[in-house]
Every structure is written in C-alpha cells, then in structure tokens.
Amino acid sequence: MWFLGDLSANLRFVKDERRFSRTSGPFRAKYKESRRGLGLILARIRKAVWMFRSWRIGRAFGIDIFLHPTFQMLLIYVGLFQGGLPVLALTSAAFGCVLLHELGHALMARRFGIRTLHITLYPIGGVAMLERIPRAPGIEILVALAGPAVNIALAALLWIFLELTLTIAPGLAGFATRLLVVNLGLALFNLIPAFPMDGGRVMRALLSGWLGRVRATAVAASVGRALALAFGAYSLYHGELVQVLLAAFIYFIAGRELAGVQSEERNSIDWPVPPNGFRWHSRGDGTYQLIPIVVPIHEHRRWR
C-alpha cells in the first residue's frame, strides 16, 4: 500500500493543472514530472495485479479452471533442483490428478444443486470454490468423499495398466507406478480428519447429528488445527517448506470456516422472545441460554 500516498499527490497535481492550464514556469515542469510519476505508479499497480491474478487455463463441465501464478515457481523449482524433466512430468501429471480430484467434488455437488464457481490450482493443491457448503450431513459426506474416490479409481486404472504393460514398456511402467503411489497418497492424505480437508468435513458431518452444526464444526476445526500444528512443526524440523505452507493454510482456513459457520448460524436463528426480565446469553461454544437481566442498584435508583 506504499503507493497510495504518491497516487493521491499526483492526482492532486492533475486537478491543479485543469484549474491552471495556462500557468507556465515551474508549475508546468512540476506537473510534467508528476505525470511521469503517475504513469510509473499505475504501471506498478497493473504489474502487481497481473502478478497475483490467476490464469484461466480452460473449462471443464462448465467450470472455469484457473492456475495461480505461484504455480510456475513450483515448476521452475522442480525442473531446476529436483530432477529435471522426468520429475517435472510427474509433477504435472500429479496436479492433473489433483484437478480430477476437485472435479469429483464439483460434479457430486452439482447432483445436489450446488454450483461450483471455479477451480484454482495452487502449489499446495487445488481448491473447488462451491457456491455454498451443503448443510445436510449425508450430502456433505458424499461431496467430501467424491474427491478421494476419484484418486482411488485412478490408482485402480493405473494398476490395471501396469498389469497389462509391465513387460512391454519398463520405463513407462515406472512412471505409472509413481503416479499410482501419488494417487493413493492424495486419497489417504485428504481423508485425514483435519478440517477443512475431506476427512475433516466427513467428521464434521458425522458429529452434526449429535452435537449440532456449530459445535461439530468447532470440534472438527480444533482437531484440524492441532494436526496442522503438529504437521507444520514436523515439516519445519525436516526443512520441508512446502509442507509448512500447507499446514499454515489448513490452520488458518479451519479458523476462518469456523467463524463463517458461527456467523451464519447467528444470522439464521429465529430467536423466540425471551420472558420479561431475561435475555439470551452466548456461552461461547455455539449454544445460548436464558439469564436474568441484572440492573445495578445505582442504575435502578436513577430510573425511579
């Protein structure tokens, strides 16, 4: 935000020029200098917006697919420092499987009338932006399990492919074996009960019928944040920075989703009118209770 002050100053010079367009001398030189500065500032703004704008790479099943600009940094790092072209090809294929995983979520949600706005691929994984989160526990479980089910199906197809071509193309078989392991890893990792990952959403849905949606979300978010802290500490100790970023992402998104569910519930509850002398009081865990209204003695005297 450092450029806002310079931008307002330059805009003030432009306004002064419109008022004193016939003024010559130092002001005209100052105005020209300010215009050049304004052009540089606007160029920086456009560059910053472009650098952090996701690129639309295609459309599948009516859903726009975006690639975050930081994804190219991952490809450059893998290509230069992690094994060259073979590892780069495996990374690209793995993110193709991530895209299919997200499409599994999106298409299952579509069966229940929930639209997917877009899918974005990040260096730490993919995100399918649903129009809304299903409230029915059964639907939420089906939508959450659709992604890992796609990875398990891909692993099964790759296993069949290996059985048919193991003796024909050993090099291709090695690539397919690694991709099979990647898909199994994606399925198992996403089934870890760390909200808001798929396993965490399944846990929240299972707890909703017993604890209610808000308290179930609070429990799932607490478990997810605890696991994210443990995973982040382990990854930091071993120098795995990408995993540290993933753990931080899980930790903060879990808290954000919990706050969103709490706000949604507060706005949607049709509170009954409390009896005279009582009011609703939040207990801080998603539940409310009636408590008596207590008026201090000095306030009572002032009202008499």
Image: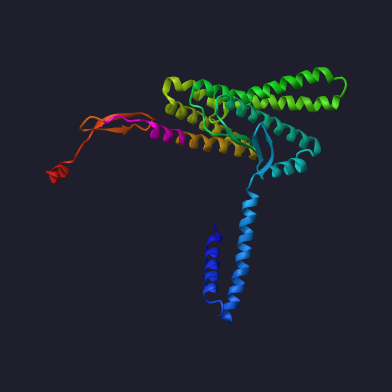
Judge by depth and name the residue closer to the eye, 59 or 78. Answer: 59
Q: Is residue 263 magenta?
A: yes
- Horizontally, is 10 left or right of 302 in the view? right
Residue at x-position 59% and y-position 33%: 116
Residue at x-position 74% and y-position 27%: 179
Query: Can residue 219 be seen in this snapshot?
Result: yes
Q: Position of residue 256 (x, y in %)?
A: 49, 37
Q: Position of residue 52 (x, y in %)?
A: 63, 48
- Horizontally, is 270 left or right of 274 in the view? right
Q: Position of residue 54 (x, y in %)?
A: 64, 44
From what the image shows, is residue 19 above or below residue 204? below
Provide the residue span drawn in magenta.
Answer: 260-273
Q: Residue furthest bottom?
A: 25
Tell me, what colour scheme is on the image?
A: rainbow
From what the image shows, is residue 112 above or below residue 245? above
Assign the N terminus to one quadrant of the image.
Answer: bottom right
Judge by depth and name the residue closer to the eye, 222 or 195. Answer: 195
Q: Is residue 200 magenta?
A: no
Query: Can residue 239 be seen in this snapshot?
Result: no
Give residue 92's quadrant in the image.
top right
Residue at x-position 51% and y-position 74%: 19
Chief secondary structure of the magenta portion: helix
Number of labels in the image equals 0
Q: Position of residue 109 (x, y in %)?
A: 57, 27
Assign the C terminus to one quadrant of the image.
Answer: top left
